[in-house]
Amino acid sequence: MDVQSATLIAGGLKYIGAGLATLGMIGAGIGLGILFGNYYVGALRNPSAAKTQQTNLFIGMALTEALGIFAFVIALLILFNAPSL
Amino acid sequence: MADPLHQFKIEKIVEFPTFHIGGVTVDLSITNSVMAMLIAVGLTCLFFLLTTARASIIPGRGQVMAEGVFGLIDDMADSIIGHDGKQFLPYVLTLFLFILSCNLLGMFTYFTATSQIAVTLTLAAMTILLVLAVGFIRNGLGFFKLFVPSGVPWYILIVLVPIEVIAFIMRPVTLTLRLFGNMLGGHIVMKVFAGFIVTGLTLGGLGALIGVASMGTIVALTTLEFLVAYLQAFVFAVLTCVYLSDVVNIGHH
């Protein structure tokens, strides 16, 4: 294989890599589902306590979501040829 | 299709000559990012000046809005940090209002300053430096108790302490990337669907159907983005409070 076609293939594989990197968001999606699902289960059983736990819900959401955002940022880094990669 | 990343391009609006301080080139030109932040801060100041100019015991519509925002952050800081929450209220409220106004301004198609990693990194660095300063001033070397949870046997501490240290180091990183990623991702998705409308309609036939469906999607996405704009500002403020609470109430948890 000559250099030119190898570079072309590598350029295409980059997109596959970026796509694979976004798979990390699956975990964040599942995590958010569990988080909000359990919050509503608890909130419907004891609605009077639901309001007080809203801040904790957002903290949990932020921490879970951060992991999905990591995957997104890695995908962007691959896609736009970040100098460090 | 138009480049969905074009919206994040920084352009100089007013150019100032560059100068050098200690070998570092400083460029204080006003870019569209700086302009967006200036507008956001200006609008926030204007809002609070107008709504609280003639404050009365029985609040009017504007005053209720201003007091609502203030009360939201005040209650939040009080419930997370506790008695000392009042000390940090000015910082947390400023942070919340700045991020919220920048996010909301971005929804009105001018420029989203919080989608620049430089801006979010600055905000996160300010927060974490404040946490470090407060931690060392209030507790001295007792600050390091933060990494040693109480009531844990020593053989578990060997594993736990490095994890706690890494978790602490990751805090500014996650603060930066969460806000940056949410704003960047949301705006890219909106522009991609806006591109689908144009490409779909120009194709005609079945393509027009896709264009109309994309139009519906973008309306739904816009409402979602307004929610995200508020939620991310709130989350940033909540996490700032949590991190401050960790060092203020050291050993109380």
Image: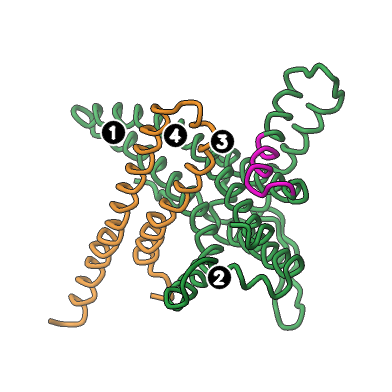
Chain colours: A orange, B green
Give how far apart the Cα atoms at labels 2 and 3 are.
43 Å
Disc 3 marks which residue?
A: B108
* Residue drawn at point x = 53 percent, y = 45 percent: B232
3 or 1: tag closer to the N-terminus: 3
Give how far apart the Cα atoms at labels 2 and 4 are.
38 Å
Disc nearest the viewer among 3 and 1 = 3
2 or 3: tag closer to the N-terminus: 3
Q: Disc 2 sits on a residue from what chain?
A: B
Disc nearest the viewer among 2 and 3 = 2
Asked whether the residues under marks 2 and 1 belong to the same chain, the reply is: yes
Q: Nearer the viewer, residue B151 or B68?
A: B151
The amino acid type found where label 4 is placed reads Leu
Residue A78 % position (x, y): 35, 66
Disc 1 marks which residue?
A: B202
Labels 3 & 1 near each other (Cβ < 8 A): no
Disc nearest the viewer among 4 and 1 = 4
2 or 1: tag closer to the N-terminus: 2
- In the image, the segment drawn in magenta is B72-83
Disc 2 marks which residue?
A: B147
The amino acid type found where label 2 is placed reads Phe
Give how far apart the Cα atoms at labels 4 and 1 are.
27 Å
Q: Disc 4 sits on a residue from what chain?
A: B
Label 1's element? helix
Label 2's element? helix
* Residue drawn at point x = 60 percent, y = 53 percent: B242
Q: Badge 1: few (under 14), some or many (20 or more) residues near its Cα, within 10 Å?
A: few
Point out which mark residue B224 bears: 4
Give how far apart the Cα atoms at labels 2 and 1 are.
60 Å
Asked whether the residues under marks 2 and 3 belong to the same chain, the reply is: yes
Residue B13 % position (x, y): 67, 53
